[in-house]
Image: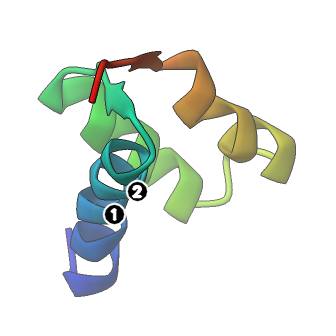
Amino acid sequence: MDGNKRIGVVLSGTMPAMNGYQLEVGRREMVSFTLSAAEVRRSVEEIAAWPGAHSRAVSM
């Protein structure tokens, strides 16, 4: 994965954490999702819904 994809992966975990959520996804699934999004195999709606479907609220 190039730099842009690596930054996207880091931010996909950082932004939810800053808002009281934890992304719960394994490394393999994260890489698969990132590459499929980068290769335009997912719709904008799928990409937007993915973090919410893979996160849980944590107490701060």
Q: Which of 1 and 58 is in front in this view?
A: 58
Considering depth in this image, is 54 or 47 the residue closer to the camera? Answer: 54
Q: What residue do we see at 30% from left, 19% from top?
A: 59
Q: Which of the colour schemes (rainbow, by chain, secondary structure, one colour) is used? A: rainbow
| Along the line of sight, the residue nearer the viewer: 49 or 38 | 49
Q: Is residue 53 left or right of residue 58?
A: right
Instruction: Find residue 42 and report its horizontal and vertical position in percent.
Output: 71, 44
Locate residue 33 relative to residue 27 in the image: left or right.
Answer: right
Q: Residue at x 29, y 56 (%)?
A: 14
Which quarter of the rendered picture does the N terminus lie within?
bottom left
Q: Distance between the residues labelled 2 and 1?
A: 6 Å
Task: Please report contact status of discs 2 and 1: CB closer than 8 Å, yes or no.
Answer: yes
Element on which disc 1 rests: helix
Tell us which disc is closer to us: 2 or 1: 2
Residue lying at the far front in this picture: please name it: 60
Mark 2 crowdedness (10 Å alpha carbons): few <14, some 14-19, many ≥20: few
Q: Where is residue 44 in the image (x, y as percent from the top left)?
A: 81, 52
Rendered location of residue 3, percent (x, y): 21, 84
Q: What element carries label 2?
A: helix
Q: Quick check: 55 above or below 2?
A: above
Quick one: which residue is furthest to the bottom in this view?
Answer: 3
Q: Where is residue 31 in the image (x, y as percent from the top left)?
A: 27, 42
Please tell me whether residue 51 is drawn above or below residue 43 in the rendered image: above
Left or right of residue 58, residue 56 in this image:
right
Badge 1: few (under 14), some or many (20 or more) residues near its Cα, within 10 Å?
A: few
Q: Is residue 9 above or below residue 45?
A: below
Residue 28 is marked as: none
45 displayed left or right of 30: right
Residue at which label 2 appears? 15
Residue that label 1 marks: 11
Q: What residue type is labelled 2?
A: Met
